[in-house]
Amino acid sequence: MAYGDNVDPKSRVVSIVLVGFLTAVMGYGLVNGLNISIVKTIAEKLDVVDVEEPPPPEEPPPPPPPDNVLPPPPPVVIPRPPVALPSPNVVQAVREVPPPPPPQYIPPAPPAPPPPTPDLSAAGTPRGNPGRWATNDDYPARAMREEREGTTGFRVTYGTDGRITSCEVTASSGHADLDAETCKLIQRRGRFNPGKDRAGNPTGGTYSNRIRWQIPR
């Protein structure tokens, strides 16, 4: 006789329920136990690897405020180049141009003459007033008594010192005493500024004049 034939059907049902319950509990435990070990393993790996988060990107500084922003220049309008129109064909009469005349030979201008040498010559001049070389006080007494009058022309020669060296009568008054008195007074009182030659050296010279003898009234 088999063992099963003596088992109570109620006990069999209870045993089956207990076995199922135990199987469920063991399955739950196995499932939970595996999950916990897996979570611990993953947590340990996560603790070993230190992942640093990248720093947040820096924001660019704000642009500086605009300083006197000028308005944009006006657009440059480039004019179109003018279109050259074709010039009409103009037929002009060609005139015969005579050949140019042969070149003429022009002789060179003669050289300019040298500048003239400055003339430093100058004639002598009387010193003072020649009219005072003979006065009424010098009238010869005899000629005055005889009331003789006349004009005597004379010419004198003087040296480089201005003194008279000679005197001659060039026109007689008609009276010898009046002519003689003329040269006598001129040689005694006459003086000259000597002249100059071309080199500027003092020179003598001659001088001519007249004296009129007239009795004062």
Image (cartoon, rainbow, N blue to C red):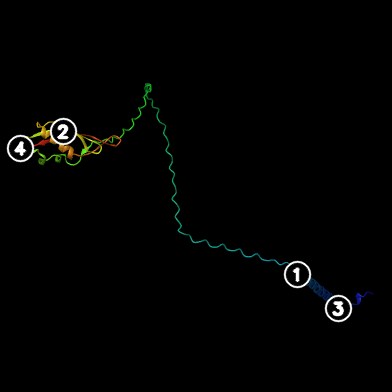
Sequence-wise first label, 2 or 4: 4
Which disc is residue 44 wearing?
A: 1
Percent across and percent down for residue 158 are: 22, 36
Q: Is residue 64 left or right of residue 5?
A: left
Sequence-wise first label, 3 or 2: 3
Quick check: marks 2 and 4 in contact, CB under 8 Å?
Answer: no
Kind of residue at disc 4: Arg
SS for tag 3? helix
Residue at mark 3? 11
Kind of residue at disc 2: Phe
Taking the spot 86% from the left edge, 78% from the top edge, the residue there is: 11
Residue at mark 2? 154
Quick check: marks 1 and 3 in contact, CB under 8 Å?
Answer: no
**Image depth: mark 1 or mark 4 in front:** 4
The quadrant in which residue 151 appears is: top left
SS for tag 1? helix
Q: Is residue 182 left or right of residue 116?
A: left
Callout 3: few (<14), some (14-19), or many (20+) C-alpha neighbours within 10 Å? few
**Image depth: mark 1 or mark 3 in front:** 1
The quadrant in which residue 126 appears is: top left
CA distance for labels 2 and 1: 164 Å
**Image depth: mark 2 or mark 1 in front:** 2
Sequence-wise first label, 3 or 4: 3
Taking the spot 14% from the left edge, 33% from the top edge, the residue there is: 153
Sequence-wise first label, 1 or 4: 1
SS for tag 4? helix
Callout 1: few (<14), some (14-19), or many (20+) C-alpha neighbours within 10 Å? few
